[in-house]
Amino acid sequence: MEKIIEGVYFIPGQDGLIPDAHVYLLGLPSSRDLTLIDVGVIGKGQKKIDLLKKHGIEPGDIKRIILTHAHMDHIGCINEVLKETQAELWMHVKEADLLEQGQELIVFGQEMIKEMCHNHYNIKPGDYTLTFDKKLEGNEYLEIGGMIWEVLHVPGHSLGSLALYNPVNKILIAGDVVYADYSIGRFDFFGSSAQELKSTLQSLSSLDVNILLPGHNQIMMDVPRGYLRETAKRWEPFLRG
Ligand SMILES: [Zn+2]
Ligand SMILES: [Zn+2]
């Protein structure tokens, strides 16, 4: 686990057959009000809990898990982590509702991936029928763990993708919307929309971002000025709906 700044910690994903999303831990340790952003792929939950414990984090201090979106590489080990933490579960309403209804395509993105995961990981129908404690819509200001985070609804990669923005330290936790190296999330899954991703990238362009914490690959500690605007511009020709 790596400290980004006081109150923001990074657990890098460990990719296997399927990628494993990065997990971020938010909250000043003294607050005992900690938040996990995503949990990662199936089978990696205990490892992450053990890692947190090794760093002196009590699982009971993790008060909530906010999921950036419902893809397998981000929520796969949710049941493993919930069992250890009793944390609340928060997500954007559009994906929370589908998960509550047992819609699995929102988890796997494609029928083929769904089949593969069911076979490989012995997933049972209903394993991802979750219940949510809070459904976010975007534009909320969360005062959690002694910090302020603005919730942004950033659809395109998925229906209810969420990003979190900390205006004090200019940190953007971006899920699978935008990454380092001017790359962006896939837009060919169930619930994806090229047109929405284009609008999302345009609206993110106006944010002042110093630290970019994406769901995969490198994190960016010193984001060049105009990076998000440039990313939106480069992808615009490919995002005509
Ligand atoms: Zn994704
Ligand atoms: Zn992902």
Image (spheres, rainbow, N blue to C red):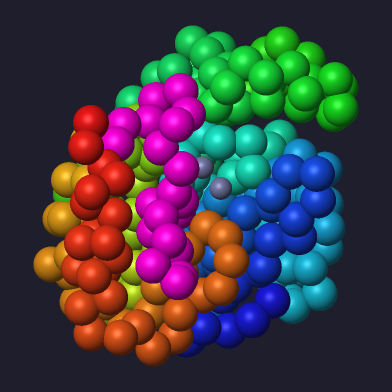
Residue 112 at what x, y percent from top left?
67, 19
Q: Picture quarter containing residue 127?
A: top right
Quarter of the rendering occupied by the N terminus: bottom right
Task: Point out the stretch of residues depicted in magenta.
Answer: 174-194
Quarter of the rendering occupied by the C terminus: top left
- Out of 81 and 169, give the one closest to the viewer: 169
Does 204 appear above or below 238? Answer: below
Residue 201 at what x, y percent from top left?
23, 54
Residue at screen point 77% across, 23% down: 116
Does 134 appear above or below 169? Answer: above
Left or right side of 70 for 52: right
Residue at screen point 69% across, 61% down: 13
Does 35 appear above or below 159? Answer: below
Whether 195 is among the magenta residues is: no
Left or right side of 22 for 236: left
Does 219 appear above or below 149? Answer: below
Residue 141 at what x, y percent from top left?
22, 57
Left or right side of 119 for 15: left
Residue 227 at what x, y percent from top left?
28, 75
- Out of 5 and 206, give the one closest to the viewer: 206
Residue at screen point 59% across, 45% down: 74
Q: Residue furthest front?
A: 237
